[in-house]
Image (cartoon, rainbow, N blue to C red):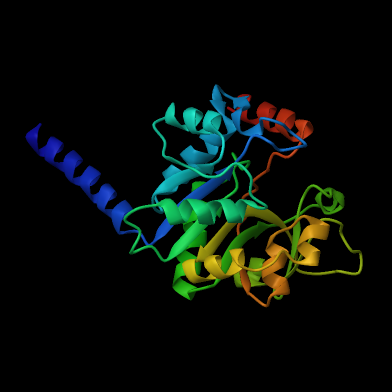
Amino acid sequence: MKKKLIKKNFASHRRTNCEIMSKTIILIPSRLSATRLPNKPLLKINNLSIIQHVYKKAKESRVGKVYVATGDKKIAEDISKIKGKYILTKKKHKTGTDRIYEAFKKIKNKSNCEYIINLQGDEPFINPKDIIKLNNNITRKKSSIGTIATKVTKSELLDRSIVKVITDKNIVKNKLSRAKKFLRKYDNSIKKNVFGHIGIYQYKISTLKKFVNLRQSKNEIKHRLEQLRAIDNDIDIDVIYTKNKSIGIDTVKDYVEIKKIMEYKI
């Protein structure tokens, strides 16, 4: 019995040390004022709010410390219910990336941190293994920015709510390639290397600082895709392939569909 207790305590101590020694912090930007689906983060699926689901997935990855970055006290209180960590930011930000940068600056004891993962707060389907895969590839390659994409169906190509990414090489074969373009409306002239984008980014700290100090680009504003700010300023984005799907929640329809999938999944 004593040996088992020592073993358990050692395993717990080792996990804690791994988290402390990690060079990556996960930040989840979240707000209540989404126009298409108000109060989205607090909507329930299986008795947990959407933001609680995302937080738990991030914690399961054990990549590093996890915080929700929010300007809404209701979201902070909701995360507290599952003993999660949060950082209060100002209420309004132009983008989620601007919000996580404010949150990052407020974190104490971050001297060893080299990367920030920006995990979108509406991705309750994100696979923790994909968070690990992203972190492993981006830190190994020392990329400026990294993200994840997966195969896309014909119907998804035509769906403007699903963001597409065009890569330089086929990421299914090469596992990783540079992003050439992000778009909502599919262009029929593009015949290869088109994938469905998943809402997660990993930034080198120096790149994140540079990114938030750049003006929003015309393409970014026009297409409502902040990653275009990086491409328009010649900042490379490496795309990692995953076979897993992760459905983001943007509309009432998305919420109803995902609620059905998650609540009736056996």
Residue at the far right: name it: 188
Image coords of residue 188 (percent x, y): 91, 64
Q: Is residue 190 left or right of residue 209?
A: right
User: Can residue 177 be seen here?
Assistant: yes
Residue at the far bottom: name it: 234
Q: Is residue 20 left or right of residue 63?
A: left
Q: Quadrant of the C terminus?
A: top right
Residue at image position (69%, 75%) is 233
User: Can residue 239 be seen here?
Assistant: no
Image coords of residue 5 (percent x, y): 14, 35
Q: Is residue 215 left or right of residue 133?
A: right
Residue at image position (31%, 56%) is 109
Which sits in the foreground, 80 or 107?
A: 107
Residue at image position (83%, 59%) is 222
Image coords of residue 76 (percent x, y): 49, 33
Image coords of residue 250 (percent x, y): 73, 40
Please determine whether, in this image, residue 38 is positioned above or below residue 70: above
Q: Is residue 32 left or right of residue 1?
A: right
Which quarter of the figure has residue 173?
Answer: bottom right
Which quarter of the figure has residue 232?
Answer: bottom right
Residue at the far top: name it: 47
Residue at image position (57%, 65%) is 146
Please determine whether, in this image, residue 115 is positioned above or below residue 79: below
